[in-house]
Amino acid sequence: MALRVRVCRLADVVPGELRAFTVAGVTWPVIVTYAEAELVAVPGVCPHEDVALADGYLEGTELVCKGHGYGFDLTTGTCTHDKTLSLRRYPITVVGDEVFVDLL
């Protein structure tokens, strides 16, 4: 069973920008952005070390962590520096102009 939560409005998501949204009851925010025109939602923490990913930056479809420079391909979640790491991609549902993600 999924835990679907409202994260933001579509207007809050800007192509080329990392935006982190706080979700009640969740330790780390959820990042929602676009990768190749696809809406993508991922955890706001790096799986390598607990560094806030919203402090990083985007290079095309790659999210680069500020902590150690690890990159994550947002189209797959795969780490471009360490293939044993991946960034979970949350399933997204858009209802009207509201963005919901399934956290479980």
Image: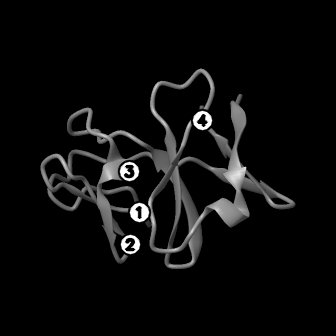
Q: Do the numbered discs 3 and 2 sit on residues whose CB atoms are within 8 Å?
A: no
Q: Dots 2 and 4: beta carbons under 8 Å?
A: no
Q: Which mark is residue 103?
A: 4
Q: Are marks 1 and 2 in contact (CB under 8 Å)?
A: yes
* Left or right: 44, with 48 as reference point: right
- Which one is closest to the eye, mark 3 or mark 4? 3
Question: Is disc 4 placed on a helix, strand or loop?
Answer: loop
Give the amino acid at mark 2.
Thr
**Residue that appears at 59% across and 35% down:** 103
Q: Residues within 10 Å of mark 3 (few under 14, many from 20)?
A: many
Residue 76: quarter of image: bottom left
The earlier-in-sequence mark between 1 and 2 is 2
Q: Nearer the viewer, mark 1 or mark 3?
A: 3
* Residue at the spot of label 3: 54
Q: Which residue is mark 1?
A: 74
Q: Nearer the viewer, residue 10 or 38?
A: 10
Q: Measure the C-alpha gap from mark 3 to mark 2.
A: 14 Å
Residue type marked 1: Leu
Q: Quadrant of the C terminus?
A: top right
